[in-house]
Amino acid sequence: MAKVDFLKKRAESFLKNARDLIKKEDYPLAAFNLQQTAQLHLKYYLFLKLKKYPKIHLLGELLKGIGKTYKKEKEVNKIIDENSNIISDLNQAYFTARYLPAEFFKPQLENMLKFVEELIRFLKKL
């Protein structure tokens, strides 16, 4: 399996895990899984075009990389502007879910899931 295929497959597994964790009301780990879903999908699409991806984890920076790489800066900036709170929550989940106590609520997770699903649809159209 190629490196790029592994990224996509792992992202899909994180999404499935996130949905299961939301049902179990384990919101901090669900948020972490959604962040990983978004991060790995972004890195997958960067790898498709660049044959490498940056070793960063912040979703906004990865999104900006997508915008620049695919000449979609305007669309990406709109996504960032309209979803900055959700992106911030997902980034927080990445850093806190593993090491620090963090609290997330069902409406946040529903918004995160919706954002991640919309992000995946956007990326598939690139």
Image (cartoon, rainbow, N blue to C red):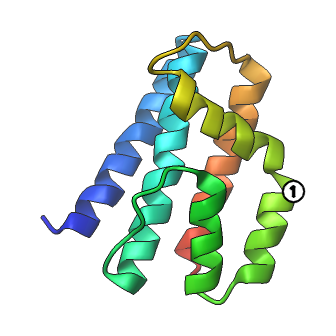
Going by the numbered disc 1, the residue's amino acid type is Glu
Q: Position of residue 89 (x, y in %)?
A: 71, 34
Q: Residue at x 39, y 59 (%)?
A: 55
From this viewpoint, which residue is outermost toward the left?
A: 1
Q: Count neighbours of disc 1 (C-alpha within 10 A) and say few if under 14, some if 14 to 19, many if 20 or more.
A: few
Nearer to us in this view, 6 or 74 = 74
Q: Residue at x 63, y 14 (%)?
A: 102
Q: State left or right for residue 84 relative to residue 95.
A: right
Nearer to us in this view, 72 or 111 = 72
Question: Does residue 121 appear anywhere in the picture?
Answer: no
Q: Which residue is mark 1?
A: 82
Q: Residue at x 38, y 84 (%)?
A: 50
Q: State left or right for residue 28 relative to residue 2.
A: right
Residue 54, quarter of picture? bottom left
Question: Which quadrant does the N terminus fall into?
Answer: bottom left
Residue 76, quarter of picture? bottom right
In this rendering, is residue 50 above or below 102? below
Q: Secondary structure at mark 1?
A: helix
Q: Position of residue 15 (x, y in %)?
A: 46, 40
Q: Residue at x 31, y 48 (%)?
A: 10
Q: State left or right for residue 33 relative to residue 5.
A: right
Q: Position of residue 112 (x, y in %)?
A: 69, 38
Q: Position of residue 59 (x, y in %)?
A: 60, 53
In this rendering, is residue 68 above or below 22? below
Question: Which quadrant does the C terminus fall into?
Answer: bottom right
